[in-house]
Image (cartoon, rainbow, N blue to C red):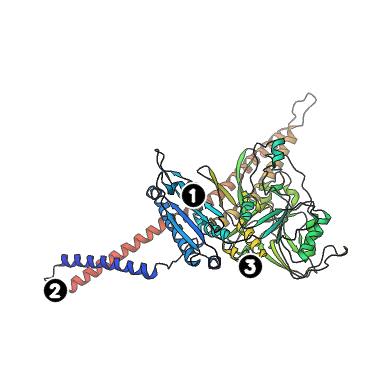
Amino acid sequence: MFKHIDTTRLSLIAVAVGAALFVAVNIVANIWFGNLRADFTESSSYTTSAQLSPIFESINEPIIVRLYYSEAVGQLSPRHSVYYQRVRDLLQQYAKLAKGNIKLELYNPSPFSDVEDRAVGFGMQGLPLSQSGEVGYFGLAATNSTDDQQVIPFFSIERERFLEYDLAKLIYTLARPTQPKIGMITSLKIEGSTPNMQQMQAAPPENPAPPWAIMQQIREFFTVQTLAADVPQIPADIDLLLLAQPENLSQQTQLAIDQFVLGGGKVLAFVDPNAETNSTLANMGSTEKRTPGNIDGMKKLMAAWGVSLAEGKVVGDADAAIRVNLAIDGRPIISDYVAWIRLQGDNLDVDDAVTGDLKQVNFGTAGALDAVEGAGTTITPLIVTGPRSMRIDVDHFVGMPDIVRLFREFQPQGKREIVAARITGPAKSAFPEVAGTLKESKQPIQVVVVADSDMLADRFWVEANNLMGQQVMVPTSDNGSFVSNALENLTGAPALSSLRGHTVQSHPFTLVEDIRRDAEMQYRAKEQSLTSRLEELQKKVDDMQVKRDGSGAAVLSEQDKKTIESYRGDILATRRELRDVQRALRENIDRLQRAITFANIGGVPLAFGLILIAAAVVRHRRRRHRAGDA
């Protein structure tokens, strides 16, 4: 009965029905499920934190957000078009959460229009689109009821991973009436070296240093007051003390900090056994060496809090070592620097709000923290090294450290070392002999101590990218988020813990890295053995050749000549063996990398092709079987 049906017409009808159903399903899905999202990225780059809701729901004043976007930008760069849609969608979500207190306004600034004039007035930065002078805009300006203003001049692609952080931070800053106040005592040039007016008139610097990125980030959320190392008393309006390598603390300042903590004040302290960043005076562009101050005052306070910094020791970690480039005798060398470490995964306490969702934190010649016996406080490790760690004498880092030697002589001690810790519980005064002062804490103290100050420096966690003449700081590690989280947690503003970016993560072949590191350690040990043998053989040859007669001529017997030739033969053989060891190291790593590269690039298409061939064969056999049955 179906033999006379026009199969061509039926196929066309099926295609038309299928297309109609496709459109209808998409329309219905967009209406019913338009707000549903699924984020399968490892770092949850597109997921809105659940903790953001209270930020927007608590807004009680109108905030106007003006999003400026030139359609010409999207026509020239489709990636910016997609980026704009994401920005707009996030802002629309925030407006819904704020229940009318956030008003989103969308503008397309046409050339020479009033909208363009307002955009420029807000500080939007134009992107040149053509040689004729046409510019495009993609930025944001937001204001609150008191005319406070926050601006993103241009949405940089480089900061796309940090979009949610940037937007939420901007709105949170406008919505919050007051900022917690931090008192900072430091010997670091963390605030830069921009001189005051009197210094400018006396001797204007050629290259004043800007504030560190960490300082700029802290000031976005907190009011910071810098205190001197001899301040007699902590001001009453200080909510938290930030102690960043506080050298040469006076006795009265130590007492002031002691009483501040016992009275309920919070502390975030960075204490470093080898402050690399502080070893060169970065003041007024000078490279003059400075004499390191002592941190004995901090050590005394820390002992009262129940924690100590391992004396004269830097902690190294073979598994977390950062690879660095260096030159030895004019030859470029890449080696693992065991004292510069990248801690991640099980090195971070996932149960603590400060480190719970961090990915990695970088440290430079950090120290190790130990609990003080008999203290009443509880020491909770926040960041620890791996088991293949070692305490190294700080003397190895005076001047230019021998990075290859440190790697070659590294002896893991099978113990995890504490690099950062939370201290809570009852504490006693470090100055019980002083009359009229608190002798013990009124309530459990709240202190976080980090055994490193270099981790605050830009080079350990941010990269500066140039965008239209302006520097854009892009985080490469979670050092900044760690500091923000700790400050937020200690000041008791829990909403801030969700305001962070998604760090750009590297995804190395861990198997390759493990094999490379183990092979390199074996090579370095073999290298040292062969080098020592070369030196010994060369010395024997030199000792034999210095035997001379009265006229100064060399006196060598036939046996001596044979011995020297034998030694020289051994020298050549040892050098060949040294080269063979190095070549074998490289070949093993290259062989494994080639296999992995093939599996990732060629293996998947090959496997897919085989599946298609198998499917075609099965389909062909089925058709033949059906034809045979017919």
**Numbered badge on residue 154:** 1
Q: Can you say whether 288 is above or below 61 in the image?
A: above
Q: Earlier in the sequence, mark 1 or mark 2?
A: 2
Q: Horizontal placement of 86 versus 567: left or right?
A: left
Residue 30 lies in quadrant: bottom left
Q: Assess whether mark 1 and mark 3 are in contact (beta carbons under 8 angstroms).
A: no
Q: Is residue 568 visible?
A: yes
Q: Horizontal placement of 1 versus 92: left or right?
A: left
What residue sits 47% from the left and 66% below the top? 96
Disc 3 designates what residue? 352
Q: Assess whether mark 2 and mark 3 are in contact (beta carbons under 8 angstroms).
A: no
Q: Can you say whether 603 is above or below 282 in the image?
A: below
Name the one closer to the observer, 287 or 524. Answer: 287
Q: Hey, what amino acid is under mark 3?
A: Asp
Q: Earlier in the sequence, mark 3 or mark 2?
A: 2
Q: Hey, what amino acid is under mark 1?
A: Phe
Q: Hey, what amino acid is under mark 2?
A: Phe
Q: CA distance from mark 1 to mark 2?
A: 64 Å
Mark 3 vs mark 1: in front: 1
Name the one closer to the observer, 474 or 66. Answer: 66
**Numbered badge on residue 305:** none
Q: Earlier in the sequence, mark 3 or mark 1?
A: 1
Secondary element under disc 3, as helix, strand or loop, is loop
Q: CA distance from mark 3 to mark 2?
A: 70 Å
Q: Residue furthest bottom?
A: 1
Q: Assess whether mark 2 and mark 1 are in contact (beta carbons under 8 angstroms).
A: no
Secondary element under disc 1, as helix, strand or loop, is loop
Disc 2 designates what residue? 2
Q: Horizontal and vertical percent for residue 181?
A: 68, 59
